[in-house]
Image (spheres, helix red, strand yellow):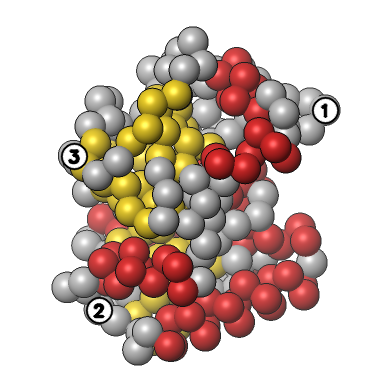
């Protein structure tokens, strides 16, 4: 499992992607679902970027163009996810991504393939959706304490782009802390950086750092191999 702060399908994250594929089939499925609300042009951008990125690595690209829940119920798209070495969810809107995939054949195929031994990765919105979710950052916040992600990782909430997020949205950490579901850890992941785990241990890989955010808002840097108590795979 890799939860990246940014950098999907870019050279800076290639070492992380190669490590995820080590010992696994050299086939990478990737879904641009989180960007669907931004329009077809943006979806096409992510599909093209992912295709070129994995092809340059000598890995077979397997684009899975899920834009809507109807797409996520398409058996043909679900079948594309079989026998891949990694499944990757790229960025956009985490709530749309989770709501689109939840309780669908495509998500069932992703979950089955991952639990059978493939790696699963999410960047930015993808990372948020794979964990307990995220608060709404618009005018109407998500209900406090209520998880809204896909829950592949339990006990964890991720703030991506952490080194820049407060500049973009002042007070964002306080918004996360006010929303945080009970019993979950809050971790910030900087850009071009990923938190990579196997269900029992986690390590920070990439250009920058990850940060543990304490209940009082204090921040502690996480580097190398780290312990995240209570964090593991969901049901």
Q: Which residue is mark 1?
A: 139
Give how far across and how far down residue 232 sits, in percent.
27, 36
- Does any portion of residue 196 appear in the rendered image? yes
Which residue is drawn at the image coordinates 33% and 69% (left, top)? Answer: 15
Looking at the picture, does residue 174 appear above or below residue 138? above
Tell which circle, 2 or 1, labels the residue nearer the N-terminal end.
2
Mark 3 neighbour class, 10 Å CA radius: few under 14, some 14 to 19, many 20 or more: few
Q: Which residue is mark 3?
A: 200
**In the structure shown, which secondary structural element does the residue marked by tag 1 occupy?**
loop
Residue nearer the viewer, 220 or 213? 220
- Does any portion of residue 106 appear in the rendered image? no
Mark 1 neighbour class, 10 Å CA radius: few under 14, some 14 to 19, many 20 or more: few
Question: What is the number of the mark on residue 84?
Answer: none
User: What separation in Å lies between label 3 and label 2 (alpha carbons)?
Assistant: 23 Å
User: What separation in Å lies between label 2 and label 1 (alpha carbons)?
Assistant: 44 Å
View extreme (right): residue: 139
Give how far across and how far down residue 134 sits, in percent.
58, 34
Q: Is residue 182 left or right of residue 112?
A: right
Which residue is drawn at the image coordinates 38% and 18% (left, top)? Answer: 183
Q: Which residue is mark 2?
A: 25
């Amino acid at each position: 499992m890799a939860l990246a702060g940014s950098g999907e399908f870019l050279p800076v994250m290639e070492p992380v992607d190669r490590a995820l594929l080590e010992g696994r089939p050299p086939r990478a499925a990737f879904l641009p679902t989180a960007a669907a609300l931004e329009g077809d042009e943006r979806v096409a951008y992510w599909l093209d970027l992912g295709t070129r990125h994995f092809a340059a690595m000598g890995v077979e690209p397997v684009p899975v163009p899920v834009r809507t829940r109807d797409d996520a119920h398409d058996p043909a798209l679900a079948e594309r996810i079989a026998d891949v070495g990694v499944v990757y969810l790229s960025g956009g809107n985490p709530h749309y991504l989770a709501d689109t995939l939840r309780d669908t054949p495509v998500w069932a195929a992703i979950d089955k393939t991952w639990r059978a031994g493939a790696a699963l990765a999410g960047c930015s919105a993808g990372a948020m959706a794979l964990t307990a979710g995220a608060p709404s950052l618009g005018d109407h916040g998500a209900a406090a304490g209520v998880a809204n992600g896909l829950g592949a990782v339990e006990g964890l909430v991720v703030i991506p782009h952490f080194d820049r997020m407060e500049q973009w949205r002042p007070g964002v950490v306080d918004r996360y802390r006010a929303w945080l579901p009970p019993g979950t850890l809050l971790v910030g992941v900087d850009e071009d950086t990923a938190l990579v785990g196997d269900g029992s241990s986690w390590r920070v890989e990439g250009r920058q750092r990850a940060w543990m955010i304490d209940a009082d808002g204090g921040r502690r840097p996480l580097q190398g191999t780290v312990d995240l108590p209570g964090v593991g795979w969901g049901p």
